Image (cartoon, rainbow, N blue to C red):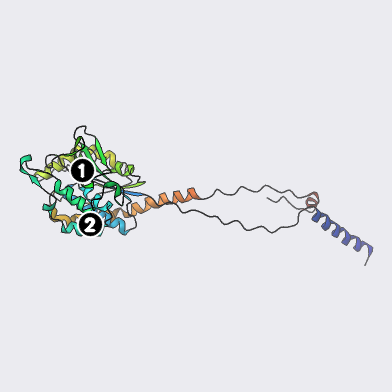
Amino acid sequence: MSLSRTRVMLSVALLGLLAGCGGENARPTPPPAPTVVQPAKPVKIGIALGGGAAKGFAHIGVIKMLEANGFEPVVVSGTSAGSVVGALYASGMDAFEMQTKAVALDEASIRDVRLFSGGLVQGQKLQDYVNQQVGNKPGERLRKPFAAVATNLETGERAVFVRGNVGQAVRASSSIPGVFEPVKIGQNNYVDGGVVSPVPVDAARQLGAEFVIAVDISSKASGRTPTGMLGIVNQSIAIMGQRLGEQELARADIIIRPRVLDIGASDFSQRGKAILEGEKAAMAAMPQIRAKIEQIQRARAAALLPPPPPKPKCEEPSRVGRLMGRKADC
């Protein structure tokens, strides 16, 4: 071996030894630690059931379709007829059980007329019926948080009943002025909640709902004269509460309006049609409900993701490394 070739080999070996002493030996990169992401909490859905006398059977159809599509409400608020359906639903009944009871319901079992009070409905039968259906449980012991909305006759203010006698609260919420006797609870008298809150969206929010589905079955002033005393009074209440109702409905996330305006306020014979219209209206709103809830869930999931790791600092090569053409490791 020639002397010049030997010198070249020794130089290469020396440079390799010096580079190793520079602390730039390649080290295996450890695998990244697994990221544990907690699942986002489910959206707390509330349903606000509006008043509308016999039209209230439509609420059952709406609830049936919500449950069938995986959007079961966990809190319930109701005004007037909506409070009746809402109380039964909050007690633990599903929509099919409520439909069975609705079909078998005898109107005489919830209506008691007292002649000496001017022919007004007393409402005691309705109170007893509701308490029987909920197992005589007070409001705070129902399976789902429930609020019945009524109107304080002395002050004109909204009253939200969430505790105590459920049947009495529903009776107060359903006491249409001029048709039902006012209900005395404590020191005050109460009448139909539709006067101040036709669709109780705000009450559902107070119960903790994060996403409120409002079901509006109220009569609108359509240029036609309603038939029967109950129909006239019911539409008069709807007109009085229309402005307030519009403001409150604007605070809902979704509004479902079953086509039940042609059903008379006291026409219990069309309960099947009302339920069917509730189903149709709920199914029509389902894409919008699904899209909005998925949007909330995506935002929650994104908020739970850990922040991206900081960029590593650049490691400068040693002097020998720079002589060998190595660049900064970033």
Query: Measured from the top left, where is residue 238 in percent x and y?
Result: 19, 41
**Rendered residue at 24%/60% (across/down):** 96
x and y percentages locating residue 79 in the rendered image: 23, 44
Q: Which residue is mark 1?
A: 173
| Vertical order, 103 against 206 (above or below) | below
Mark 2 surroundings within 10 Å by alpha-carbon count, few (fewer than 14), some (14 through 19), many (20 or more): some
Q: Quadrant of residue 218?
A: top left
Left or right, 117 with respect to 135, comes to left
Q: Residue 76: x and y, percent?
A: 29, 48
Q: Residue 297: give x, y in percent of width and height.
A: 42, 51
Q: How far apart in space, not on screen, are marks 1 and 2 (Cα)?
A: 20 Å
Instruction: Mark yes or no: residue 31 visible.
Output: yes
Position of the N terminus, as image quadrant, is bottom right
- Tag on residue 59? none
Residue position for label 2 = 98
Q: Which one is in front, 289 or 27? A: 27
- Residue at image location 16% in from the left, 48% down from the top: 126
| Secondary structure at numbered mark 2 | helix
Q: Is residue 53 left or right of residue 326?
A: left
Q: Earlier in the sequence, mark 1 or mark 2?
A: 2
